[in-house]
Amino acid sequence: MASFDGPKFKMTDGSYVQTKTIDVGSSRDISPYLSLLREDSILNGNRAVIFDVYWDVGVPETETKTKTSGWSLSSVKLSTKNLCLFLRLSKPFHDNLKDLYRFFASKFVTFVGVQIEEDLNLLRENHGLEIRNAINIGKLAAKARGTLVLEFLGTRELAHRVLWSDLSQLDSIEAKWEEAEAEEHLEAAAIEGWLIVNVWDQLSE
């Protein structure tokens, strides 16, 4: 039975985010984990799943290629109020990633991200992956608060401006990023996802 059995991290409000990291090989079924994320988004997060994507940047083979044609999706982070899933993708992609494609195409989930326009274009152009219902949380915050600069802020700065949260936990990890252990990197990822969940909740009120 699928479970988020990775490290569990305590957030500043006393709640916990349970994590799971998966190396997505050809035989790994990720659909049960995506179902758990969907369920948690319905129960605890206004049907929102926070997403972030990471890229391998290759060198174009010919000068006729665009500057982003060598970019390949390497990992995906999906977060809800209580869960954080980190998918490390193999090359080439396997058929089981069709579950991820279907998940992103769902009309029942809102996928929320920070400064996502370029990522959406790269996903579409380089991988044929469409996110059906995507929202740039910075743009939403800028409109809701009447403050244009919010659209252009990163995760930490946006959370600070909208939530005025205690960010010392995240700052302490980022201050020693190069020396930090893999589990601390995962903790930072979980915190960032949780922060954007809370930004979304506040803007949705």
Image (tube, rainbow, N blue to C red):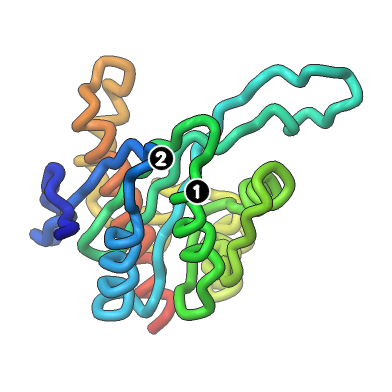
What residue do we see at 11% from left, 51% from top? 10
Q: Position of residue 64 (x, y in %)?
A: 91, 25
Q: Position of residue 98 (x, y in %)?
A: 51, 56
Name the kind of residue labelled 2 in the image: Ser
Q: Determine the image quadrant of residue 82.
A: bottom left
Residues tagged 1 and 2 counted as in contact (Cβ below 8 A): yes
Residue 72 drawn above or below residue 50: above
Q: Is residue 61 left or right of residue 97?
A: right
Q: Is residue 183 left or right of residue 60?
A: left
Residue 77 drawn above or below residue 70: below
Q: Residue 95: which numbered mark, if any?
A: 1
The residue under label 2 is 26
Give whichever of discs 1 and 2 has the lower sequence position: 2
Q: CA distance from mark 1 to mark 2?
A: 7 Å
Secondary element at image label 2: loop
Q: Is residue 142 in view from this perspective?
A: no
Secondary element at image label 1: helix
Label 2, residues with CA under 10 Å away: few <14, some 14-19, many ≥20: some
